[in-house]
Image (cartoon, rainbow, N blue to C red):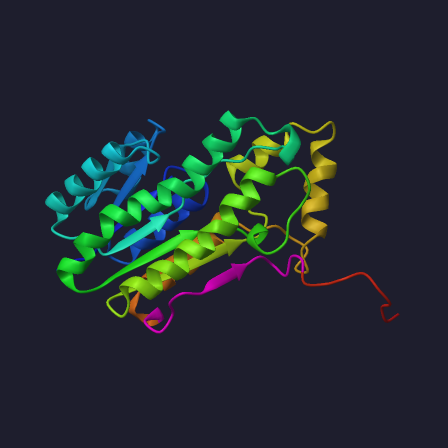
Amino acid sequence: MKKTAIVTGGVKGIGWAASKALHRDDFNVSILDWDEKGHEKIKELGRDSMFIHCDVSKETSVKEAINRIAEKFGSVDVLVNNAGIQRYSIVTETTEEEWDLVMNVNLKSAFLCAKHAIPHMQKKGEGVVINVSSVQAFISQQNVAPYTTAKTAMLGLTRSIAVDYGPQIRSTAVCPGTIDTPMLRESIALSPDPQEVYQECVDMHLLKRIGTPDDVGELIAFLASDKARFFTGQAIRVDGGLGIMVAGSKRD
């Protein structure tokens, strides 16, 4: 039977790239997102796909959506927890509302989707959970306290799923560096000189470019496949070498 993948936040950016790659690799693809543009985007995938408008930070919405997917396609085999938002602030200036919003969308959603997808995977005796974290689970820039906290916590969730539900279910975390997504463009646009900030992002990476959504989407598709059957519990950085070089002497 054809396998089914769920992608949260799948309407744009990394989520859309993952949705396309999984559909190409012969998965039924279900996108969960609060962006109504999903109704149009799903037409690009065509058959064996569906879109559900869903607030993935709300358990009732998540449970209903995942049950609908299982009923339509007969199984839930892969869950890609990609939904995420960015807010810029430091601890002493972050409001409780901002903190809760980032935690709910970036972290709680992954917990809720895993909670309700895993039982469907257990019925089949196998499954894959892929959590889209960030390179900022390892290194942090300034002014992103809620975001880097949530993305770091996703690594613990990844390990817990791998330990608690193995060997039937695999769980991995994907940790992108700077990726050219709508969220990045929106963030850069807030600066006085967007082009300067964009170039700074480029220069931070050893490969001297920022990533594309497809760079991450292809990794997600690989981890979802049987080719990655010996991967579990790990965080995999797809970051163009961001943050591995320290300042010091260099050769001429």
Q: Nearer the viewer, residue 9 or 141?
A: 141
Q: Nearer the viewer, residue 25 or 65?
A: 65
Q: Residue at image x 72%, y 63%?
A: 245
Residue 250 visible at all = yes
Magenta span has 31? Answer: no
The region drawn magenta spans: 228-243
Q: Quadrant of residue 180?
A: top right
Q: Picture quarter containing residue 122?
A: bottom left
Above-or-below relation of 149 to 233: above
123 vs 82, left or right, is left
Q: Residue 117's spot in the image, x, y percent?
A: 23, 49
Residue drawn at 38 percent across, 41 percent down: 108
166 up-or-down from 210: above or below = below
User: How many badges with numbers are in the image?
Assistant: 0
| Res 6 seen here | no
**Quadrant into which the C terminus falls:** bottom right
Task: Give me the residue at 74% from left, 38% from top.
Answer: 196
Q: Quick check: is 233 in the magenta stretch?
A: yes
Q: Position of residue 129 (x, y in %)?
A: 32, 56
Relative to residue 250, is residue 78 drawn left or right? Answer: left
- Residue 230 in the image: x percent, y percent? 35, 74
Q: Quadrant of the N terminus?
A: bottom left
The residue at 28%/51% (across/down) is 23
Residue 151 coordinates in the image, percent (x, y): 50, 48
Whether residue 170 sits left or right of residue 153 in the image: it is left
In this image, 27 relative to 130: left or right? left
